[in-house]
Structure formats: C-alpha cells, structure tokens
Image (spheres, rainbow, N blue to C red):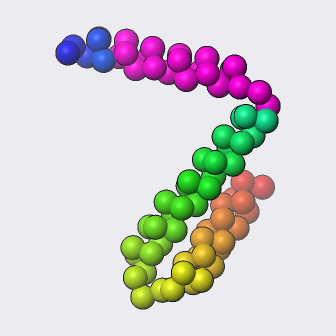
Amino acid sequence: MSDASIAAQARSSDLAKVRRARAMTAFEKFDAGATLFEEACAWTLAGISHQHPEWDQARCHQELSRRLKLATQSTS
C-alpha cells in the first residue's frame, strides 16, 4: 500500500466522521461529549493507579479531581 493510498483512505475516513457528526442532533453531540469525557476520566484513573499502585480508589479519584481542577484553571 502506497503513502498516497493511505493518505486517501485517511481523508475518506475523516470525511465520514465529519458527515456522521454533522448528522447528529444537538443532544447526540452533547451525549457523545459526555461519553468521551467519562472515557478519558477512566483512562486517566487507570494511569494514576498504575503510577501509584499503593493508593486506594478514593485517593486516585482525589488525584483525578485535582488534575481536572488544574486543567480548568489553565483554560480560564
């Protein structure tokens, strides 16, 4: 498979994603955003647990909350 073929397939895939997103209702877009946020939090919690295996679940959630607060502070 050539680089040009790969690039064409990537563009086609991106266009399909854009078309699907444009066809979504406002509620579906909002719901998708919430789902993505929840998934990102789950991955972040997994990373925190991996970095700090000695921490319990409550401490990992505290760290996630701390990181989210930092992220919101840096965007304001």
Asked if residue 50 is among those painted magenta in the image, a careful observer would answer no
Q: Is residue 41 above or below residue 60?
A: above
Indicate whether 45 appears above or below 59: above
The quarter of the displayed image where residue 75 is located: bottom right
- Residue 15 image offset from top left, x and y in percent: 53, 16
Which residue does the image show at 60% across and 47% down from the upper left? 36
What residue span does the magenta drawing correspond to?
7-26
Dominant SS in magenta: helix
Residue 2's x, y, as percent? 21, 14
Task: Please check the rendered image and state whether residue 25 is part of the magenta-colored stretch, yes or no.
Answer: yes
Left or right, 10 with respect to 5, comes to right
The percent coordinates of residue 54 (x first, y second) are 42, 88
Quadrant location of the C terminus?
A: bottom right
> Could you tell me if residue 42 is visible in this image?
yes
Is 45 drawn above or below residue 6 in the view shown?
below
Q: Residue at x 75, y 40 (%)?
A: 30
**Drawn side of residue 18 relative to residue 54, left or right:** right
Against 52, residue 4 (above or below) is above
Seen in the image, is 75 located left or right of residue 42? Answer: right
Outermost residue on the left side: it is 1
Q: Position of residue 16 (x, y in %)?
A: 53, 17
Question: In what quadrant of the picture does the N terminus appear?
Answer: top left
Marks counted in the figure total 0
Q: In this view of the protein, can residue 70 be seen by the observer? A: no
